[in-house]
Image (cartoon, rainbow, N blue to C red):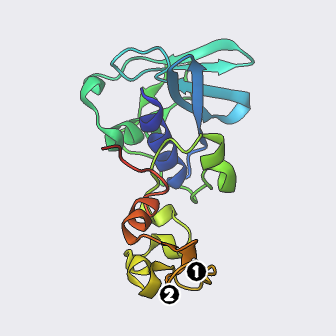
Amino acid sequence: MDEFRARRVVDALRDHGVNAHLLRGGVGQFGVRVSLPGGREAEWDTDGTAGLEAQVMRDGMLVGYVPQIEGSEAFDEAQIVDAIARTDYDQPVARQRATAAPPGPALTREGGVFRRFLDGFRYRLPARDLPGALAGSGEESRQPGGDRAGRLCLPAGRGNQCGVDGVAHVGALDEHLGDCGQVDAG
């Protein structure tokens, strides 16, 4: 599983009340770690195979496993989340329940305020995760002078433009920054 897909699966599981974490299995290997009762942890999809399976570990020792789920090679993220949420880990060889347990209260997403700093700003956040004015429809970039609402203009060097040394705040750049600083090359 690639890193970004694993992160989205972890976030969706945490939204459903499952205590899931991003698992860094090795160089370029990512998966999902689910904390279980009794100090056990299920490590999902860290071996690089196409199918979805897990090892159940306690103190670094294998105490159970989830066999590869049939047809999981073609699962989308919602199906992966459903499969992980429906797994019953009570037996050494785990099985899938017919229905998922009722979702618990949503858990906070890992990383909090520093999440994007720790991850090196390598992905885009959905609009619902953006703070305040950045989550808006982009109206802030069309204000007179190009400045965002509530921000004071810096003293202009030339003319009546807001900016630094006469360089205006560019609305097009604002749209890219609205994508959390991810500017497409070209």
Can you identify the residue that label 1 sits on? 156
Return the x and y of residue 59 as percentages of the image width and height: 75, 18
The answer to whether residue 116 is above or below residue 152 is above
The crowding category of the residue bearing disc 2, from other C-alpha atoms within 10 Å (few below 14, some 14 to 19, many at least 20), is: few
User: Is residue 56 rendered to the left or right of residue 54?
Assistant: right
114 or 82: nearer the viewer: 114
Name the amino acid, label 1: Ala
Q: Residue 175: x and y, percent?
A: 39, 65
Residue 156 left/right relative to 37: left
Q: Quadrant of residue 43?
A: top right
Q: Residue at x 46, y 65 (%)?
A: 128
Q: What residue did someone put label 2 on?
A: 160
**Residue 138 seen in the figure:** yes
Residue 75: horizontal and vertical position, in percent?
Answer: 28, 33
User: The residue under label 2 is which amino acid type?
Assistant: Asn
Residue at the spot 35% in from the left edge and 43% down from the top edge: 185
